[in-house]
Image (cartoon, coloured by chain):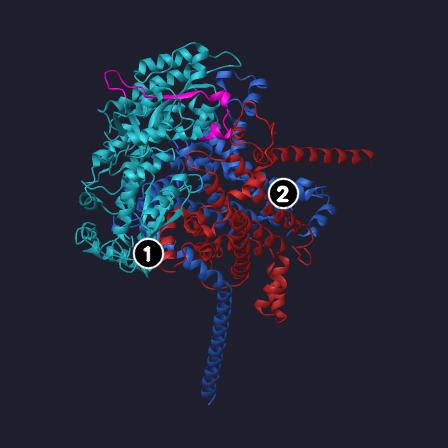
Chain colours: A red, B blue, C cyan
């Protein structure tokens, strides 16, 4: 009896040991960001010797970033984009995914494959035709709407949600159908509540992707300074032709990372056993 | 008489059959319409903003175009040029090596991490967030840290020197020559395992607790539980993770330019990858036709791999 | 015939995409965008410069004109505003609207915007020659020859730079900024070693010997005699200074002695290793201002960086405060003062709403008036008048010795990248193999052979 408990103890200790080692390995970049954000530009890349806390920490960097660019505005733009895109993405993806996972129609597999196939095409290839279309047909160049149109209907979300719905037994839907529930109700009353963890995942991914996106805003929003996003603002304000201000860049990056971490910390609570498994029999 | 009756009967049967079929057809059509109504909101946006430009890009592979002047048809000239293009061949080879190394390693690492962080442990949320750090932290920071770890006089080489007694002159240069691919792979596993961990975490929540309880009653050990419950139950998730990993690995770009590119994004024949070459051809040289041709090759490769994975999933679904 | 059909099919596709075409462009020539279904390029593009341009409508009568000007790093670069203010002060009916596209991906963003519509900007700054080649080939900027001859502009003022960017006899941009490479050195380190400073007339052998003399590997106070940034210009282009060789020649055996010079220095610890520089991302400014680099070849733009950072205290003046410049070293038998140049140009877009007004601004910026503004902000104008030179050398913080001032005189200027049809491609191939050679992935001979092979294929397909 005792030895079993001891065994369990040893196991726990090992698990924690592994966790702390991994965590140490993973947290370094964040610590580096924090450390660099209070350094001067020269100190940031100084390697020999590398110091974590500089002699004269420049806390002022965190004040300076608000003066050097219209940070509030960029945060506002980015937050607006992120919220709208994430909302549309969740709604349309989970909707379409239900159909791909649980309903039947001709050429379903082919259409689905077409979805996945577009993910495999690098954006760099169709960016120019897309840009010409967006600016000449839809006249969206420089507008935040352009970013919403491009990011809200991704194939990625559909693919991911479909995979999660595939894991939910068909019998559950069949039973509801026999009870006379319409497909829309099944989606609303059965699938959505069951897919909380996957909705959380999609929210996290869409949020991070939109929040941190650089290339999209670079192409579509650069000419219109009023619509710059955080990433665009940071890069254009602190990376210059001949010299870059890495201290300020890192301070701004730390600030812009905070919302992402908060969102993650809140949403990861959905990854709890039991939420999804109630009522499902494997 | 009886014959007539019979005939009428058959007629009736036929009619009711037709009605039945018609009814079924109608039902079928209704079902299809409902199914499509679910897809429509996403599909319309997707088709207009993504699918059309993608199809256009495919057409471009057979043309010569710089984005401004009229498009000129070029037949398969772009493709014939590909196979004598040293940089393309090098990029293709490097990308494939990178994928072979990165996909399985990341898959295993992220699944292990997810299982570990799905246990009842204190501070689980914090640990999960930390695991997600390398993915969300600023790219400049992530690469700076990685380069620091693997630099000539960095900690990794120090370990080799002090613990494994590698001679000073034999210490590896991690970002040059053959080793550069190893750096890419290790870096990617580290950076992306947190991302795929999140997907696995969500997938793990879909597995019913009762399954494990039943297995425990049968006296199954941890490994048996994993092999007979966790792994098979995670199949759809694993399919998703492996497809996305494959696609994302084939599209590797940032990792290469940041680790080996230097300040003017220059990659050599041993460090170049396909999407970097596409970028180079497309946006530096504005040879969009040729860039599309390179992308076609990449696309066909990914498609082939995905189809194999797709078949794997189908087999699972049927069994 | 089949081909024709296919072409029209492709065209149809592109029509769908560009449905509304250049909606909003109004009067501007739309021939350069995808809407045109012409399959030949030649007949589409002769712009309206010849007809009636020279005597056109007397410069705007009362109506205000707004010119959209594409630039980068607005906040960090004082001359954009200075040029705008100076021009607007002279022309009160014109407003210059600065549009900041950021420096990192400037040429990519600019070319993409112009692919969408050539009227996105009226005047564009052209950051480098590969970018210039792109804009010219995409028919997004106007040839300026007619304007130039009408305005009687003396191109010889540009010291030969314009000849190196002429495309089929036509000039599509005028330079307004010209940076050239000089040798920066840290006087303190020479003093400490008791060695004479570099002179304005050094051969490469003398330069190499000096670098070796001044360097020291004493623990704690090691000094690198030389420093080469990771760009290929810092090494390869020693080879083009004799005026006989060019990076467009297709054979690159003349790079060899210079690769040997630098790689030998690297082996002997005279300079930092290329691989470490690339891995650690050490910026040249950090290297030089760190106080352990005796000599560094770099562009003249670094002069104003040094001055500004020493004044603000970002650079430690006890480490690098006592700096000066000298002329570039040269090959045996070649005149001193030959050096590499990098020009920044300004051009009129083909979709500009008022080309004459746009040209007038281009003429101002690239001319002597613009040159004065540039010099006053501490930058090197493309027209290097003695007045401009005096302004720069009397800037506060500019090295006080006579030699540094004399180092600003350039006898022959070779562009880092002169114009050629495939210059972007050639440029990236040279970049790539430069990295291969410097990092030791290839030997010098292998690398040069690979350059010869790859670029030979482009030049003689």
Which chain does the residue under circle 2 lie in? B
- Find residue A142 and report its horizontal and vertical position in percent: 42, 54
**How many numbered dots are placed on residues in this image?**
2
In the drawing, what numbered circle is on residue C64?
1
Horizontal side, residue C437 vs residue B202: left or right: left
Mark 2, secondary structure of its residue: helix
Q: CA distance from mark 2 to mark 1?
A: 56 Å
- Find residue A37 and report its horizontal and vertical position in percent: 57, 36
- The residue carrying pointer 1 sits among few (fewer than 14), some (14 to 19) or many (20 or more) residues within 10 Å by Cα, namely few
Q: Which residue, as the protein is rendered here, is positioned at the far right?
A: A1
Which chain does the residue under circle 1 lie in? C
- The residue carrying pointer 2 sits among few (fewer than 14), some (14 to 19) or many (20 or more) residues within 10 Å by Cα, namely many
Whether residue C147 is visible, yes or no, is yes
Q: Which residue, as the protein is rendered here, is positioned at the far bottom?
A: B1
Tell me which segment is drawn in magenta.
C308-336
Q: Nearer the viewer, residue B163 or C178?
A: C178
Question: Measured along the vertical axis of the image, is residue C321 above or below residue A276?
Answer: above
- Find residue C160 and report its horizontal and vertical position in percent: 23, 32
Please tell me whether residue C91 belongs to the stretch shown in magenta.
Answer: no
In the drawing, what numbered circle is on residue B61?
none
Q: Nearer the viewer, mark 2 or mark 1?
A: 1
Q: Residue at x 50, y 11 (%)?
A: C218
- Find residue C172 and report its horizontal and vertical position in percent: 24, 43
Q: Which residue is mark 2?
A: B129
Horizontal side, residue B289 vs residue B106: left or right: left
Question: Measured along the vertical axis of the image, is residue C231 above or below residue B79?
Answer: above
In which quarter of the view is residue C198 placed? top left
Q: Nearer the viewer, residue B62 or C160?
A: C160
Mark 1, secondary structure of its residue: loop
In which quarter of the view is residue C343 placed? top left
Please tell me whether residue C309 belongs to the stretch shown in magenta.
Answer: yes
Question: Measured along the vertical axis of the image, is residue C345 above or below residue C13?
Answer: above
């Amino acid at each position: 009896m005792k030895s079993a408990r001891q065994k369990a103890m040893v196991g726990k200790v090992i698990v924690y040991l592994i966790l702390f080692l991994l965590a140490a390995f993973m947290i370094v970049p964040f610590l580096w960001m924090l450390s660099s954000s209070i350094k001067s530009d020269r100190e940031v890349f100084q390697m020999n010797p590398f110091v974590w806390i500089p002699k004269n920490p420049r806390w002022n960097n965190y004040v300076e970033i608000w003066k050097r660019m219209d940070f509030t505005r960029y945060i506002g733009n980015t937050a607006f984009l992120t919220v709208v895109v994430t909302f549309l993405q969740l709604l349309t993806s989970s909707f379409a995914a239900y159909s791909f996972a649980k309903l039947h129609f001709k050429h379903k597999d082919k259409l689905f494959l077409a979805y996945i196939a577009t993910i495999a095409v690098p954006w760099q290839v169709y960016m120019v035709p897309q840009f010409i279309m967006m600016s000449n047909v839809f006249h969206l160049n420089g507008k935040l709407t352009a970013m919403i149109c491009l990011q809200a209907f991704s194939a990625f979300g559909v693919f991911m949600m479909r995979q999660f719905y595939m894991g939910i037994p068909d019998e559950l839907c069949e039973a509801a159908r026999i009870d006379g529930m319409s497909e829309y109700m099944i989606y609303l009353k059965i699938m959505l509540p069951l897919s909380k963890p996957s909705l959380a995942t999609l929210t996290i991914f869409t949020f991070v992707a939109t929040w941190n996106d650089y290339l999209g805003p670079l192409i579509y929003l650069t000419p219109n300074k009023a619509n710059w996003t955080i990433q665009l603002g940071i890069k254009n304000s602190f990376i210059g032709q001949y010299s870059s201000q890495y201290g300020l860049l890192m301070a701004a990056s730390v600030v812009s990372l905070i919302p992402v971490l908060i969102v993650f910390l809140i949403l990861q609570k959905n990854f709890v056993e039991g939420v999804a498994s109630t009522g499902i029999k494997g | 008489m009886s014959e007539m009756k019979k005939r009428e009967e058959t007629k009736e049967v036929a009619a009711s059959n037709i009605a039945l079929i018609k009814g079924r057809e109608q039902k079928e059509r209704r079902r299809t319409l409902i199914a499509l109504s679910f897809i429509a909101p996403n599909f319309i946006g997707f088709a207009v903003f993504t699918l059309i430009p993608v199809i256009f890009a495919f057409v471009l592979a057979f043309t010569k175009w710089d984005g401004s002047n009229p498009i000129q048809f070029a037949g398969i000239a772009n493709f014939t040029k590909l196979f004598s293009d040293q940089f393309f061949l090098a990029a293709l080879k490097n990308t494939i090596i990178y994928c072979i190394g990165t996909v399985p390693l990341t898959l295993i690492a992220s699944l292990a991490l997810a299982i570990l962080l799905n246990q009842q442990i204190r501070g689980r949320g914090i640990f999960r967030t930390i695991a997600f750090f390398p993915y969300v932290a600023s790219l400049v920071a992530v690469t700076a840290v990685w380069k620091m770890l693997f630099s000539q006089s960095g900690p990794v080489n120090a370990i080799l020197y002090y613990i494994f007694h590698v001679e000073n002159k034999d210490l590896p240069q991690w970002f040059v020559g053959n080793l550069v691919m190893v750096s890419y792979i290790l870096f990617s596993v580290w950076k992306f395992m947190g991302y795929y961990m999140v997907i696995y975490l969500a997938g793990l929540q879909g597995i019913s607790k009762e399954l494990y309880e039943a297995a425990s009653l049968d006296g199954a050990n941890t490994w048996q539980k994993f092999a007979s419950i966790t792994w098979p139950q995670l199949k759809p998730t694993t399919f998703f993770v492996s497809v996305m990993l494959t696609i994302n690995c084939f599209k590797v770009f940032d990792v290469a330019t940041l680790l080996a590119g230097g300040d003017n994004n220059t990659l050599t024949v041993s460090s170049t990858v396909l999407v970097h070459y596409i970028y180079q051809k497309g946006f530096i040289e504005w040879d969009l036709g040729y860039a599309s041709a390179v992308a076609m090759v990449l696309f066909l490769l990914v498609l082939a791999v995905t189809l194999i994975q797709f078949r794997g999933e189908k087999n699972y679904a049927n069994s | 015939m089949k081909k024709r059909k296919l072409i029209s099919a492709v065209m149809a596709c592109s029509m769908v995409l560009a449905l509304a075409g250049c909606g909003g462009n109004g009067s501007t020539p739309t021939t350069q965008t995808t809407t045109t279904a012409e399959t030949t390029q030649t007949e589409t593009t002769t712009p309206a410069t010849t007809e009636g341009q020279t005597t056109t409508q007397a410069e705007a009568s009362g109506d205000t004109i707004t010119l959209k000007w594409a630039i980068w790093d607005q906040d960090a670069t004082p001359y954009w505003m200075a040029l705008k203010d100076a021009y607007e002060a002279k022309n009160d009916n014109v407003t210059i609207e600065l549009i900041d596209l950021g420096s990192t991906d400037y040429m990519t963003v600019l070319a993409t915007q112009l692919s969408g519509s050539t009227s996105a900007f009226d005047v564009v700054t052209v950051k480098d020659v590969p970018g210039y080649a792109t804009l010219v080939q995409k028919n997004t900027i106007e040839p300026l020859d007619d304007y130039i001859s009408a305005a009687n502009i003396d191109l010889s003022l540009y010291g030969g730079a314009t000849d190196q960017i002429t495309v089929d006899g036509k000039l599509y941009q005028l330079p307004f900024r010209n940076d050239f490479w000089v040798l920066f050195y840290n006087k303190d380190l020479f003093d400490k070693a008791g060695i004479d400073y570099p002179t304005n007339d050094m051969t490469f052998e003398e330069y190499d010997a000096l670098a070796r003399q001044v360097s020291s590997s004493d623990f704690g106070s090691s000094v690198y005699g030389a420093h080469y940034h990771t760009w290929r210009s810092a090494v390869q282009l020693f080879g083009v200074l004799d005026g006989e060789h060019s990076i467009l020649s297709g054979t690159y055996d003349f790079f060899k002695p210079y690769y040997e010079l630098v790689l030998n220095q690297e082996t002997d610890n005279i300079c930092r290793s290329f691989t470490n520089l690339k891995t650690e991302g050490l910026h040249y400014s950090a290297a030089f201002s760190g106080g352990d680099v005796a000599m560094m070849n770099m562009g003249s733009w670094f002069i104003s960086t040094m001055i500004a950072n020493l004044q603000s205290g970002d650079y430690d003046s006890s480490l690098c405060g006592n700096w000066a410049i000298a002329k570039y070293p040269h090959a045996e038998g070649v005149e001193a003062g030959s050096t590499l140049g990098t020009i920044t140009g300004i051009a009129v877009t083909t979709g500009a709403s008022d080309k004459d007004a746009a040209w007038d601004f281009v003429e101002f910026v690239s001319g002597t008036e613009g040159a004065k503004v540039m010099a006053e902000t501490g930058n090197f104008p493309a027209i290097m008048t003695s007045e401009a030179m005096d302004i720069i050398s009397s800037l506060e913080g500019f090295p006080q010795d006579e030699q540094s001032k004399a180092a600003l005189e350039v006898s022959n200027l070779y562009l880092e990248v002169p114009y050629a049809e495939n210059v972007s491609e050639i440029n990236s191939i040279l970049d790539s193999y430069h990295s291969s050679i410097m990092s030791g992935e290839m030997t010098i001979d292998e690398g040069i052979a690979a350059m010869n092979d790859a670029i030979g294929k482009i030049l003689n397909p």
